[in-house]
Image: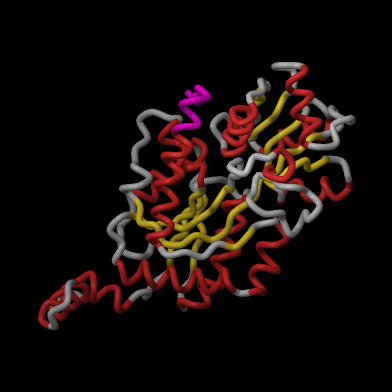
Amino acid sequence: MNSRRRLIVGATLAGLSPWTARAQQWPDRPLRFVVPLPPGGSYDYLARALGEPLSKQIGQPVVVENRAGADGRIGIAHLARQPADGYNIGIISVTNVTHPSLFKNIPYDILKDFQPVALVAHAPFVLLVGPALPDVKTARDYVELARRKPGAVTFGSSGVGSPFHIGGEQFKSALGVDMLHVAYKGSGPLATDLLGGQVMSAFAPVGPNLQHIRTGRLRALAALTDERLAVLPDVPTMSEALGLPGLSMISWLGIVAPQGTPAPIVERLNREINAIVRDPQFVRDKLAPQAYEPMTHTPQAMQQLMSRDLEKYAKIIRAAGITAE
């Protein structure tokens, strides 16, 4: 009798399901951590930052596997097809929750095919202007310019339907201004053109732009957050700058597993990941340098966040007529 058969028979005799027995022995081999984007981005950075301490806590290697393509959809589809045995996890963000509203024939259901495990961090957004708008010093200056010259003010994003594009559309809708969206293939080309004056402004994450903000090459006019940011304490929120308390948006990142992953394993992973994210050294050394804010929640709370954001951004995408195909 092989070891798997002995495990199943023993579990049955003990009154346990085979999955419960396996969960009690978990982990007894390495975990695969699927990153659906190339090395070097925020997904990859956080997965590797998290993987090292997680490996130490569970006593098994955590192997990061980059499965890039189609803005993350290839890697996410790959994860959905993996066994729900507790040895396959992946990282997603709010971007993946917006995809059902942007793309047809996605081969997975982001809410039904995945088991939320834990939230890790969120990246705050800011409204940035570059050298193309030297006289725009405040968010009110920016809005007044957009109202004086409808359709003339450009704002860039890292892609059609990206969280940063959606943030810009929220801004336009809330203030009733007409601005021209310019889509880039990634945040790198966008930053290059913003610094070079080819695009006037951008709704963008703080982390990759923090050094340019601090040196004055870019100006942060307002944060799309409920409270001021610790890394940019002099930058007002949208509520303070323009009286728009509802204009806040975060790009969260979290961990999921294939649907059907045993609950005891999900709960263990949630406890371990939350412990890492709550560690002041992890926050100081891994999150703060990229302007990430830590997030710790239950799997149930992450599921609720995913459901709310899917509905929220679907409405914005429909109202703005955003299409990515």
Residue 250 seen in the figure: yes
Q: Image height check: is 49 above or below 240?
A: below
The residue lying at 86 percent from left, 32 percent from top is 131
Q: Name, please, the residue furthest toward the bottom.
A: 14
- Residue 83 position by quadrant: bottom left
On the image, the x and y values in percent for residue 252 come to 55, 52
Q: Is residue 244 magenta?
A: no
- Residue 8 position by quadrant: bottom left
Of 274 and 37, nearer the camera is 274
Relative placement, left or right, of 233 versus 20 is: right
Q: Image height check: is 101 above or below 286?
A: above
Relative placement, left or right, of 308 versus 112 is: right
The residue lying at 74 percent from left, 23 percent from top is 146
Q: Name, please, the residue furthest toward the front.
A: 243
The residue lying at 27 percent from left, 73 percent from top is 22
Please state, as top left, top right, bottom left or bottom right, where the N terminus lies in the image.
bottom left
On the image, the x and y values in percent for residue 265 come to 35, 70
Of 223 and 322, nearer the camera is 223
Write the start and end of the magenta stretch as one range.
315-325
